[in-house]
């Protein structure tokens, strides 16, 4: 943990109170500060400006009181901070507008697998560096995405010269400046995309904000200010058995894929249900299973045939039955019960996806019975219906994995992945999931001895 000393300007009515002797703490990506003031009932501040050794001018955004310390030397109030901008003062949240957000992203570097180093040490004892060209990921309605490559150098007596390559995602506003919140929404959606295709990295992202109005005290143009927040990282938890798509193979299609990713409202609910496992790692088996069920059901409702009968035919049948009912209560009861009567059941939805399900499930499985078990298990968890022919224990977990893989396959297709890309990504899925299922079953029940 690192600590810094300085002062803040605490908002007070329409003015500011100068508070000296403030201590700022940084632990990993977490910031908080301790101020020698009395608690006055105000628990939240949108913006607090200040200055600290090691940071210079700072703007703290979304500050919340998290505790109070009382002692003979006076009271101290602890504030948690969600976002920090170093290098400038911004007094109002309406002024949190910028032209570009740059994010040094280790996960993106790992996916692209591009390097500028050319190693010829063995034969010619030489090494050269030529950074790859900038990659344009796409121009969208309000913003553009590009990937830039860079390198920095450090040296010390113990390690000598260290060269470190990095990859930066540049999010540029296309219509003047955009708000900080718009940039962060794009950043988080992009990190979701990486997680959804299986790209993970535990390392912290580094953030930089740009705007033409940033100026140093001497009037020289300042290109960027440092921005601090918690990285939006997902954890590679669980098993899905999918191969990460190779960037080079989808590079020509990436703009269209990302355009659908950022704009398709119909995909977002299923995506969020799938990704919850990678963000909230403490999900129970039942919650994971239900999320997987809901994700594929929502996908099917929005992208596949969602009517048993044409609307006109169903309405004719419905009106004919209603005409034979006597009271308004009977009519209301009937209409409520049949609100979704013309939609396929969960079982019918899964059965309509059998062709894709076959890519994922073991060849030896009885698919019809397995689908019944999934449906019965879902109904048992949600409605506490009969437990006959349901799944339990590890079988629930691996059914969730199967449904997750099925949902991903369907969404990849909607995003524009070709069938050949999909088959490459799922080439070993069946064997990997089935192999892990059988191994865990053996470990759970004990290895049979001859």
Image (cartoon, rainbow, N blue to C red):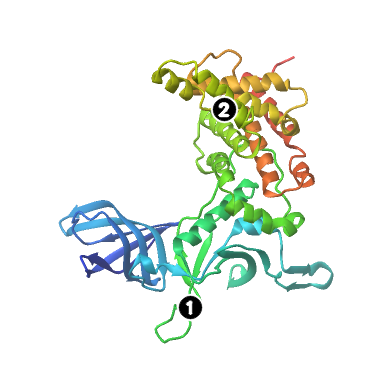
Provide the secondary structure element on which disc 1 rests: loop
Q: Can residue 320 be seen in this view?
A: yes
Vertical relation: 35 (above or below) 438: below
Tell me the distance, in whole angstroms, between the alpha carbons under discs 2 and 1: 60 Å
Q: Residue at horizontal 67%, vertical 66%? A: 136
Question: Which residue is label 2 attached to?
Answer: 315
Looking at the image, the residue that sits furthest to the right is 123
- Quadrant of the image occupied by residue 107: bottom right
**Numbered badge on residue 212:** 1
Q: Position of residue 315 (x, y in %)?
A: 57, 27
Vertical relation: 320 (above or below) 93: above
Q: Are marks 2 and 1 in contact (CB under 8 Å)?
A: no
Q: Residue at horizontal 54%, vertical 58%? A: 187
Q: Residue at horizontal 79%, vertical 69%? A: 121
The N terminus is located in which quarter? Answer: bottom left
Q: Where is residue 434 in the image (x, y as percent from the top left)?
A: 71, 29
Provide the secondary structure element on which disc 2 rests: helix
Q: Is residue 393 visible?
A: no
Is 371 in front, or is 439? 371
At label 1, counting other C-alpha atoms closer than 10 Å, the crowd grade (few under 14, some 14-19, many 20 or more) is few
Looking at the image, the residue that sits furthest to the left is 72
Vertical relation: 41 (above or below) 126: above
Vertical relation: 379 (above or below) 160: above
């Amino acid at each position: 943990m690192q600590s810094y000393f300085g002062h803040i300007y605490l908002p007070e009515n329409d003015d500011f109170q100068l508070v000296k002797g403030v201590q700022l703490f940084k632990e990993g990506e977490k910031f908080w500060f301790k101020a020698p003031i009395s608690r006055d009932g105000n628990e939240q501040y949108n913006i607090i400006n200040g200055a600290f050794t090691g940071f210079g001018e700072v703007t703290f955004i979304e500050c919340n009181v998290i505790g109070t310390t009382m002692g003979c030397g006076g009271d101290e109030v602890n504030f948690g901070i969600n976002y920090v901008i170093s290098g400038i003062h911004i007094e109002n949240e309406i002024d949190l507008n910028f032209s570009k957000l740059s994010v040094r992203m280790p996960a993106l570097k790992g996916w692209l697998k591009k390097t500028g180093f050319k190693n010829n040490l063995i034969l010619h004892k030489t090494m050269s560096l030529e950074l790859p060209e900038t990659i344009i990921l796409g121009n969208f309605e309000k913003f553009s995405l590009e990937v830039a490559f860079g390198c920095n150098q450090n040296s010390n007596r113990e390690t000598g010269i260290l060269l470190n390559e990095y990859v930066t995602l540049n999010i540029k506003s296309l219509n003047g400046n955009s708000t900080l919140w718009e940039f962060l929404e794009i950043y988080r959606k992009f990190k979701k995309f990486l997680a959804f295709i299986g790209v993970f990295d535990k390392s912290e992202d580094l953030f930089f904000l740009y705007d033409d109005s940033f100026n140093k005290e001497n009037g020289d143009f300042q290109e960027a200010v440092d921005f601090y927040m918690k990285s939006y990282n997902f954890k590679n938890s669980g098993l899905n058995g999918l191969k990460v798509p190779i960037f080079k193979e989808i590079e020509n299609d990436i703009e269209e894929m990302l355009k659908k990713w950022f704009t398709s409202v119909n995909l977002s609910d299923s995506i969020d249900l799938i990704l919850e496992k990678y963000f909230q790692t403490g999900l129970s088996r039942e919650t994971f299973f239900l999320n997987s069920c809901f994700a594929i059901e929502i996908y099917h409702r929005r992208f596949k045939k969602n009517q048993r009968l044409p609307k006109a035919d169903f309405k004719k049948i419905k009106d004919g039955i209603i005409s034979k009912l006597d009271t308004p209560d009977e009519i209301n009861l009937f209409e409520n019960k049949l609100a979704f009567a013309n939609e396929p059941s969960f079982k019918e939805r899964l059965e309509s996806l059998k062709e894709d399900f076959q890519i994922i499930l073991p060849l030896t499985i009885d698919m019809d019975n397995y689908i019944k078990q999934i449906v019965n298990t879902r109904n048992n968890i949600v409605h506490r219906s009969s437990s006959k022919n349901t799944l339990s224990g590890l079988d629930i977990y691996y059914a969730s994995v199967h449904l997750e893989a099925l949902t991903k396959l369907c969404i990849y297709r909607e995003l524009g992945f070709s069938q050949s890309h999909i088959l490459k990504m799922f080439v070993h899925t069946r064997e990997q999931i089935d192999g892990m299922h059988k191994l865990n079953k053996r470990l759970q029940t004990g290895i049979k001895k001859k």
